Amino acid sequence: MKLNPQASGLNERLETAAPEVAEMLSPMGRGLYFPKGILSQSAEATEKASRYNATIGIATEDSQAMHLSTMARYIECLSPDETFPYAPAGGVQSLRALWSEKQRRENSNMQGKAVGLPIVTSAITHGLGLVGDLFVGPSDRILLPDKLWGNYRLTYEVRYGATIGTFPFFSGSCFNIAGFKEALAREAAAHSKLVIILNFPNNPTGYMPTVEESREIVSSLLATADSGTKLVVICDDAYFGLFYHLGGESSKESLFGELVGRHQNLFSIRLDGATKELFAWGLRCGFLTLGPGDRNSAEEVIDVLDAKLRGAIRSGVSNSPLLSQTLVERCLTDLESIKERDDKIEILRERAERVNLSARSSRFSDSWEVYPFNSGYFMCLKIKGVSAETVRRHLLDRYQTGLIATAEYDLRVAFSCLELEEIEPLFELIDRSVRDLT
């Protein structure tokens, strides 16, 4: 496996300082590194961005983490048995059932489908790793859009030795259906099995496909499966429910329900959770739902893979925290919590609308283009005339403002962290920085 330059640099430092320890590293140990991506850029922003910090993938309100006050109340009144014992490896059964009901309630396309009872994970990153334990090895190929969350590379290329192929996310203001079909055909011709990651709403762009685009995506996957290629499709739905319909109506349902039970060569997996949906990032409570493609064998397949996943959890983290699961379960049964969640989503929608208006102002057209966005926590700018990293460093050092450079010319803005009155001044600073540099 070709090492990432950052991993090679760490290995060289270790070989210089302690060659004996360097020789002890496993292949994965040699490949691991802490990416100079979102987390390291966020750390820099925490230190320097005293003015605006639009880097972190959480939502804030009144200078603190946005949260549900109903959930905060529960912490004071839980019994010891709801807090301190071990949870089952697969999660608390009643919580799994409640989350399943929520999924079906919010996704009509899941009604009547044979899917597994959601397994509790330590948030979505853990879920991605569990999918890797089951389905990803050194010979596997992962396909996803070029606008991607960098942790996919660390998880699947470094930890599991797979390779990643990408295709251009956008064609104009739309999801690049033609590019997706072309990439599927190309990769299917070279591989008997593909792993596809569909992250909607997307991080970093904040884009959710339209209903018609979703149909085209599903149709393309089914055609590929019908040609004989085996597909594992991961629906990373971390930002599910945060739909603002900017510029037109987007889909409001996960692609997962459209893929379940459709073809024996297509196995779908849904990853979602309380992390973003309930504004509870630190609880690390996510869910993994299995979606077999053959309805005739679905029950047996789910039973077998559920056991394997519980084994992977048991041998990895043992179980997810009971306290987190108890808090999430309480929220799912509390009507006041549900209303409060809707109120928080409305706050984010107002911010997204203000961002959409401000970022697209004609006075900024010399400095950037705005990638399409309509959902989630983020939006992206395509900077003109200078690299995004150069702009990011300039914003941080001169204007104490933190953003994330996700590609050579792409700058990500986490509007989830911005109050309404901060949005226009932030874009003015970005524009000033680009002009400073060009």
Image (cartoon, grey):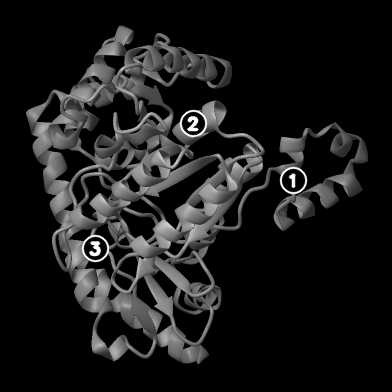
Residue 247 image point, x, y percent: 16, 68
Amino acid on which the number 2 mark rests in the picture? Val
Nearer-N-terminus badge (3/2)? 2
How packed mark 1 is, by other alpha carbons closer than 10 Å (few <14, some 14-19, many 20 or more), is few
Is 430 above or below relative to 305? below
Distance between mark 3 and mark 1 Cα atoms: 45 Å
Q: Is residue 145 left or right of residue 337?
A: right
Q: Are marks 3 and 1 in contact (CB under 8 Å)?
A: no
**What residue is pinned by disc 3?**
419
The image quarter containing residue 95 is top left
The reply to whether residue 350 is in sight is yes
Nearer-N-terminus badge (3/1)? 1
Residue 354 image point, x, y percent: 19, 70
- Give the camera-side residue of 421 and 181: 181
- Looking at the rendered image, the quarter that the N terminus falls into is top right
Query: Looking at the image, which residue sits at the far front?
Result: 227
**What residue is pinned by disc 1?**
1
Nearer-N-terminus badge (2/1)? 1
Residue 361 image point, x, y percent: 24, 84
Q: Is residue 36 left or right of residue 104?
A: right
Is 25 above or below relative to 350? above
Amino acid on which the number 1 mark rests in the picture? Met
**What residue is pinned by disc 2?**
131
Distance between mark 2 and mark 1 Cα atoms: 20 Å
Amino acid on which the number 3 mark rests in the picture? Glu
Q: Residue at x 34, y 20 (%)?
A: 323
- Give the camera-side residue of 92 and 401: 92
Distance between mark 3 and mark 2 Cα atoms: 37 Å
